[in-house]
Structure formats: structure tokens, C-alpha cells
Image: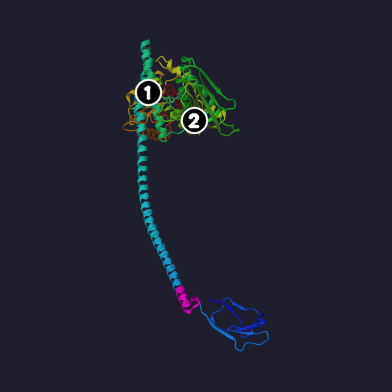
Amino acid sequence: SNSLQVRFAALTFRQGSNVVFRYRMAGMSPKWVETTERELNYPRLPPGSYTLEVMARNAQGVWSAEPAQFNFQVGRPWFLSWWFRVGSVVVVLMLGHQLWRRRTRRLEAERLRLETAVEQRTGELIREKKRLIEEKVRTEEQNRQIEHLLADAQKTSRFKSDFLANMSHEIRTPMNGVLGMIDLLLATRPDSEQRKYLETAHLSAHSLLTILNDILDFSKIEAGRLDLNEIPFLLRPAIGEIEKLFAVPVANKKLRFVVSIAADVPDSLLGDPDRLRQVLVNLVGNAVKFTAKGSVEVAVRLAKPAPEGAAVELHFAVTDTGIGIAAEKHELIFEAFRQADGSTTRTFGGTGLGLAISTRLVEMMGGKIRVESAPGQGSTFHFTARFERTSAEVIENTTPVASLRSMLEAVGGGNGNGVAGHGLKILLAEDNPVNQHVVTRLLEKRGHVVTVAESGREALDCAGRQSFDVILMDVQMPDMDGLEATALIRERERARGSHTPIIALTAYTMKGDRERCLAAGMDDYVNKPIDAVKFLEVVESTAAASKG
Ligand code: ADP
């Protein structure tokens, strides 16, 4: 321990309280210190050798002869000893070294970890790159395959279109025969029972033709081979015709048929009146078909206000009070071959194509179609269509003078001896015997004289030997087709400076057919199966025009 407590005493016999001491601590201070206290305290002495000397003086002032001496030493504590210090330094150094080694090891481990991670990632990236390259190669291969398939598909689609064109020819030609023959039989004054059978046969053949036309129309639209016309027409008369068309079923069912066209809807439009009529006929036909009592209404208004001169968007609504359509069927009925209720086919007939075709046609006319209906509440089919405007004069000049109805009466009322003033000399180039017969009889009934050629080559010869007012040219014939025969006739005529009108008769109603016929030098174009009224009108007006 490094603290010292000292008590001292001096022997005297008198006035002991007057004894004074003095002391000094050699090794700390060389000076004597006087005190009356008898106790000294040295708390924390530094290590070292010390000598404490104490002297006493009695009351008479006499100092003791010799000082009392106390030698002692304060030792060093172990933690201040040199070996401890050296040891400590060594331990600290060793600890430091150890720490440093641990840290280096940790850093090294971290470095290794990072290196492996980098290596791993690099490996992954390389693999990824390889995979991407493989993927690219695969994609390129797939693209090549897709292009190949696409080319194949386009080829198949072309085959399909050709197949359709042929089908149309193959099916319409005999249909033409059936309908024509029934027409001719009806004109032979059958008795009333025979007339009834013939009319039923006519009706059946006609509905077959309607179905056929639906399927062909739909396929043409699907093949992208249907073009809309851009011709001037009058809206109100076009809609009026629809009313006439349904006059009989509407009267039979005692329905009320209402047409309302808003006053601000312009009349003179530019567009495809036949396709607009087709949509309306389909919607009105359905409305009449599915309505047992009440009314069918056609309403036309502007879809949005149209400034003077700009294109107009019209809104059409066909409303009936019929059986209605459940909400979950509202989308389905616009799909091809779909009907709201499978049993409707049995009850009402129909192919389920009408609305699919209408949807496409409306889209082609820049509009949309939708239905609003609930079972038992009737239905309203809405659609819009865009038309350019045109002036009324343009239409007057393009509308045929003879009205359809008067022509119909002329044909129907014929007595077999022809109509005065109609003795045209006509060359008919047609290889199909049924068609030859139908067309010849129809023309002869009108008082025309018909020469038949069985092929294009024969027609060419006939036209060379004799002059005709009109040549009717079937397009598809063996030996030499109608287009080639026409081109050769035109070539010969150029040398002579003459021109005989040539009208194409074709069951091809595909996009581009009309252009092909006109390009070959033909003057006009009639579709088979022929509509007797339109056919005669075209033949006679073409002949009249060429005679001037
Ligand atoms: P189709 O009349 O030849 O069957 P559509 O495509 O014209 O084909 O019509 C599809 C179906 O939509 C019809 O079979 C009928 O179920 C339903 N439908 C169409 N119009 C009406 C309507 N006005 N009232 C009730 N159902 C209708």
C-alpha cells in the first residue's frame, strides 16, 4: 500500500502539552516542518525510498539530541512493473496482429466471395447470351415458317376465292335454268292447281337462291373481295322500295308498317344503295318474320348534325313488337351461322348469316350496328352509315327512264308474240343448253330474233358473217372464252370502223370481274341467274343507245 500514517510521542514530565515536534521526510522535502499535532498522514505516496525524521522540543525549548528515524520504502504496484508493461505491449501487439489478421482474412473472404459472384454472374450472362442467340435463331426460323405458312394461306385463300367463283357459276347456272323454266311454264296459262305447284316451286327455288346468295356474299366479304359502289342515289325512294317489297307479308300478318325519315336528312347521296338496301331488307325481313302482331317501324335521322356539303352520318332504327331477344344473345346473333334460339330455324327458317353480313356491310359503310331488345318486348336494331352528298341533278341523269314496274308488266303480260318495236337481232354466245333455252325464250317473247353460238369461236364466226344489234357473251365457255372472243371482235371492228354492243353474261360476281369484262371491250355486264326485268332493260337500252 502506498499510504502512511505516523503517530509520535515524546517523553516529558512537565507541561506535556507545550511539547512541539518537527519533522522532515527525506526523499520528499529537505525542510523541517514544525507542528503541535502528533499525527501525520501521507495518503498516495509515489514509489521510492523514504526516511522520516521527527524531533521533539520540550516546554523549556530544548530539542531532542537525535531525531527519531523511520526508513521505509513504497514499492511499485505490479501493473506498473516493467515486465507488466512489456507484457502489456506484447499482448496489445499480439491482439492487434490477431485483429489485423482476422480483418485481412475477412477481407480476403469477401474478395473471394465477390470474385466467385462475379464469375458466376459472368457465367450466367454468357449462358443468357447464348440462350438469346439460340432464341433469335429459333425466332428467325419460326418467322420463316410463319412467312411460309402465310404464303401458303394466301395461296389457299386464292384457291378458295376461285373455288367460290366456280361454285357460284356451277350453282347459279342450273338455278337460272330452274327459275327460267318455271317462269316460262307460268306463262303457258297453267290451270290453277298447276299454277299453285309452279308458284311453290318458284318460291322454293327463290329461297334457295337467297340462301346461296347469303353464303356467297358472306364468303366474298370474308375473302375481302366485296367492294362497295360509289354511285349517286336518292334515299327516300330507296327506302320506299323496301316498304313495297314487304307489302304482302305485312298485309298478311295485319302488321302496321311505318317509315319515318327526319326532314333534315338529305335525299341525294353518294354510296351503295344496293348494299344499304340489303342491310335494311335483312333487318326489316327479320322484324316481319319475328313479329306476329303489332308494328314494324323504320326510322332514319342524322346521327349527328352535318354541316352543308359535308359527308353525313345517318342513323337507322328498325323497331318491331315481336318476340324479342334475351340479353345474353345480343352479341351472339351478330356472329355468322348463329341464331338466338336453335328452334327458330325450324319455326322461321334462315341461315343465321343475315346479321353477320349486315354487320360487315355496315362496317364497310363506316358505321356500327347494335340491338336493343328483351324477350316479349320487341326489338330495335340500330345502325349508322356514312354517305357523301351529291346534287339531285346528277341522280336524275343516271336513273333509268323506264320504271321497274312498267317493265315487269311488259314481260309478265306478254302474249308470246312479242312487243311491237322490239325486233332486235341478237347473238347469244352460251354453251349451256338450259341457259340457251331460257335466254332465247325470254328474248323471243319480247319479239327479238336470237342466233345461238355454242362457243366463243362460233360467236366470232357468226359476228363476222352477219351483223347484230347486240351480242350477249357468256364469259366461261370451252374452246374460246367470252373475254378473248370479245377482244377479237373488237379488233376486227376497228378495221371496219363499226361497233356492236357486247353484254357479258356471267355468274362471276367477284370483285374485279366487271372491270375485266369492260377491259376486254364489253359494254355492259349482267349477272346470272338473270333477273328477267333488269336483263331486258339492259339489253334493250344498250341496243337503243348504240343505234343513237
Ligand atoms: P336468320 O334470320 O337467317 O336466322 P340473322 O343473322 O338475320 O339470321 O338473325 C340471327 C338470329 O337473330 C335470328 O335467327 C333470330 O334468332 C335473331 N333475330 C334477328 N332479328 C330478330 C328480331 N327482329 N326479333 C327477334 N329475333 C331476331
Front residue of this view, candidates 204 and 81: 81
The answer to whether residue 90 is magenta is yes
Residue under pointer 2: 369
Is residue 510 something one can see in this rendering?
no
Identify which residue is drawn at 42% across, 62% down. 114
Question: Taking 263 as reference, is 226 left or right?
Answer: left
Figure quarter occupied by ligand 1: top left
State the image coordinates of residue 226 (x, y, percent, origin top left).
Answer: 43, 33
Check the image and report above or below for 14 versus 506: below
Front position among marks 1 and 2:
2
Check the image and report above or below for 248 versus 94: above
Q: Quadrant of residue 181?
A: top left
Query: What amino acid is found at the position of numbered circle 2 in the picture?
Result: Ile
Front residue of this view, candidates 543 and 462: 543
State the image coordinates of residue 272 (x, y, percent, origin top left).
Answer: 49, 30
Disc 2 crowd rating (10 Å Cα; few below 14, some 14-19, many 20+) is many
Number of numbered labels in the structure image:
2
State the image coordinates of residue 116 (x, y, percent, origin top left).
Answer: 39, 62
Q: Main secondary structure of the magenta part?
A: helix
Disc 1 crowd rating (10 Å Cα; few below 14, some 14-19, many 20+) is few
Query: What amino acid is found at the position of numbered circle 1 in the picture?
Result: Leu
Residue under pointer 1: 208
